[in-house]
């Protein structure tokens, strides 16, 4: 089974993936962007916020996605795959930019992924108050510096992206305690 843990920055994706790895010790844990050698370089480029063109940023994400699917996801579809983000995030960010129409977004992602997407997408959902509290406690990267309203718009765009791709989305309240969140994910994996 291939699942993706989605959510905006500080939602607790890494914490939940660490917890899930204890329940699925043989799972392949990966991330997007940055799940390959090339992907790590692309991730650094994107997080540095040096691209002036939002289309260029989107194409960098697509390049990472194509490499990630070919090198990591496709050869391991027979295993449990737990991914920190997926194509969903890339589409969500592109939806917010508004420079690429929805039909093209889907087609370009289908090309990059060969139509391989997570079977279940878990969205760790944050409230504005919780997001701002968490952001206030860390040094912000280029994406986080865009502000809480931007990040909350991404959160809504993640929902739209899963609908565009026809994927199963499970929304989880990320303000709950860690154990309750993990249990909620586990319950939904086993359904």
Image: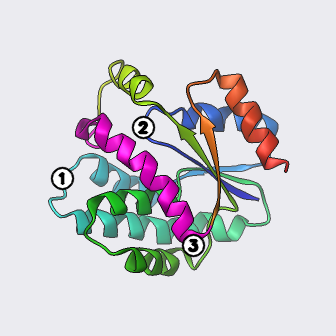
Mark 3 element type:
helix
Q: Which mark is residue 70?
A: 3
Element at badge 2?
loop
Say above or below: 120 vs 122.
below
Q: Quadrant of the N terminus?
A: bottom right
- Image height of 154 relative to 58, above or below: above
Q: CA distance from mark 3 to mark 1?
A: 27 Å
Q: Nearer the viewer, mark 1 or mark 2?
A: 2
- Horizontally, is 169 left or right of 63 in the view? right
Q: CA distance from mark 3 to mark 2?
A: 26 Å
- Residue closer to the observer: 162 or 9: 162
Residue 14, label in figure: none
**Disc 1 from disc 2: Cα separation:** 19 Å
- Residue identified by numbered label 2: 9
Q: Nearer the viewer, residue 70 or 168?
A: 168
Identify the magenta region.
141-166
Q: Are marks 3 and 2 in contact (CB under 8 Å)?
A: no
Q: Main secondary structure of the magenta part?
A: helix
Mark 3 crowd level (few <14, some 14–19, many ≥20, 10 Å Cα)? some
Quarter residue 179 falls in: top right
Q: Position of residue 157 (x, y in %)?
A: 43, 55
Q: Residues within 10 Å of mark 2 (few under 14, many from 20)?
A: many
Inspect the magenta stretch and tell me whether residue 161 lies in it. Answer: yes
Residue 82 position, x and y percent, is 67, 50
Q: Which residue is mark 1?
A: 50
Q: Position of residue 23 (x, y in %)?
A: 81, 37
Sequence-earlier tag: 1 or 2:
2
Visible in this render: residue 102? yes
């Amino acid at each position: 089974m291939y699942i993706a843990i989605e959510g905006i920055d500080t939602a607790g994706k890494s914490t939940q993936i660490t917890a899930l790895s204890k329940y699925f010790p043989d799972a392949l844990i990966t991330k997007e962007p940055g799940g390959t050698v090339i992907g790590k370089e692309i991730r650094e480029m994107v997080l540095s916020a040096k691209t002036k063109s939002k289309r260029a940023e989107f194409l960098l994400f697509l390049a990472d996605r194509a490499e990630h699917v070919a090198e990591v996801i496709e050869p391991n579809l027979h295993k449990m795959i737990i991914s920190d983000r997926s194509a969903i995030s890339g589409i969500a960010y592109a939806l917010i930019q508004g420079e690429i129409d929805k039909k093209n977004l889907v087609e370009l992602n289908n090309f990059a992924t060969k139509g391989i997407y997570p079977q279940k997408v878990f969205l760790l959902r944050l409230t504005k108050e919780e997001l701002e509290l968490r952001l206030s406690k860390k040094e912000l990267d280029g994406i986080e510096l865009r502000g809480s309203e931007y990040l909350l718009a991404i959160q809504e765009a993640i929902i739209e992206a899963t609908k565009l791709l026809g994927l199963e989305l499970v929304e989880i309240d990320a303000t709950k305690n860690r154990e309750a969140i993990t249990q909620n994910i586990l319950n939904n994996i086993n359904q």
